[in-house]
Image (cartoon, rainbow, N blue to C red):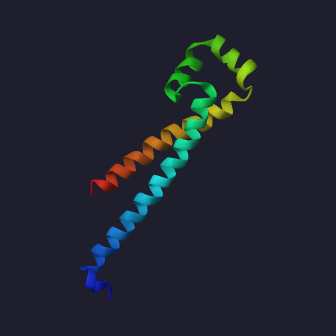
């Protein structure tokens, strides 16, 4: 029956590729949602936050006292989301360019 749609191997490869695109897109959306939560909570994007905590001790103290004492946990997850979106986006681009 699959032969009616052309080469079986090619059809299976296209189906797997489409499945991968859907799953990767879902993963990026999940990470983007989590990343956006941190962006809203801290009022800036990840690169800006990373730079501020590295260079501005007064900012770190303000965050600990007035925003969230466990900001380091958020920062670790935020970094995971931010870098994960980049990694998954590169993988998606690679799939779409093949």
Residue at the (59%, 19%) spot, across then down: 53
Nearest the viewer among 58 and 32 is 32
To which quarter of the image does residue 74 belong? Answer: top right
Residue at the (34%, 74%) spot, across then down: 12
Q: Position of residue 52 (x, y in %)?
A: 56, 18
Q: Position of residue 68 (x, y in %)?
A: 72, 26
Image quadrant holding the N terminus, namely bottom left
Q: Count the marks: how many?
A: 0
Q: Position of residue 90 (x, y in %)?
A: 38, 46
Q: Is residue 64 above or below residue 86?
A: above
Q: Is residue 7 above or below residue 48?
A: below
Q: Is residue 83 above or below residue 5?
A: above
Q: Position of residue 54 (x, y in %)?
A: 57, 18
Direction from residue 96 to residue 62 in the image, left or right: right
Residue at the (52%, 28%) spot, across then down: 45
What residue occupies the far left of the structure in this picture? 6
Direction from residue 21 to residue 28 in the image, left or right: right
To which quarter of the image does residue 98 belong? Answer: bottom left
Q: Is residue 1 above or below residue 53?
A: below
């Amino acid at each position: 029956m699959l032969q009616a749609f052309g080469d079986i191997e090619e059809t299976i490869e296209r189906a797997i590729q489409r499945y991968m695109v859907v799953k990767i897109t879902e993963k990026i959306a999940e990470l983007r949602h989590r990343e956006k939560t941190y962006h809203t909570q801290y009022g800036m994007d990840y690169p800006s936050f990373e730079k501020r905590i590295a260079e501005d001790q007064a900012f770190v103290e303000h965050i600990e006292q007035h925003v969230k004492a466990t900001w380091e946990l958020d920062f670790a997850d935020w970094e995971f989301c931010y870098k994960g979106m980049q990694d998954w986006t590169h993988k998606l681009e690679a799939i779409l360019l093949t």
